[in-house]
Amino acid sequence: ASILDISASHSLQLPTYTVVEATGLANVATGQVIYVSNGASGSPCLAVYSGGWKQVAIGNTITT
């Protein structure tokens, strides 16, 4: 169980799936994270696998 250190990178690009593609993925494990292009009633969201893909809502634009 290793930790992936991406601190030297400026961002992280997650794999992108539709809801249909995500539900058809094989070999998934608890804790996996994906970007779903239409997972929040047609809008994009993040999803984490926990016995099924669970939506992680994307909130407001970041501000200072």
Image (tube, grey):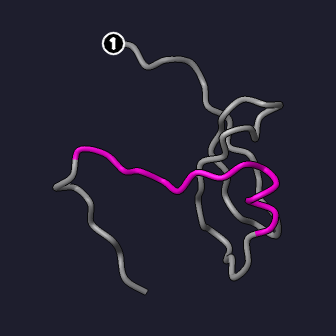
- Tell me the quadrant of the picture where the N terminus can be found: bottom left
Q: Quadrant of residue 39?
A: top right
Look at the picture and state if 18 lies above or below 4.
above
Residue at the extreme bottom: 1
Foreground residue, 52 or 1?
A: 52
Measuring from the top left, give residue 8's x and y in whole percent. 16, 55
Disc 1, SS: loop
Q: Residue at x 80, y 68 (%)?
A: 24
* Percent of width and height locating residue 12: 37, 50
Q: Which residue is mark 1?
A: 64
Q: Is residue 13 magenta?
A: yes
Position above or below: 52 against 35 = below
Mark 1 residue type:
Thr
On the picture, is 16 further left or further right than 29?
Answer: left
In x, y percent, where is residue 20? Answer: 82, 55
Q: Residue 46, located in which quarter of the rendered image?
A: top right
Q: Which contiguous range is marked in magenta?
A: 10-24
Residue 29 placement (x, y as % from top left):
67, 77
Q: Residue at x 79, y 31 (%)?
A: 42
- Residue at image x 33%, y 12%? 64
Q: Nearer the viewer, residue 63 or 24?
A: 24
The quarter of the displayed image where residue 40 is located: top right
41 relative to 30 in the view: left or right: right
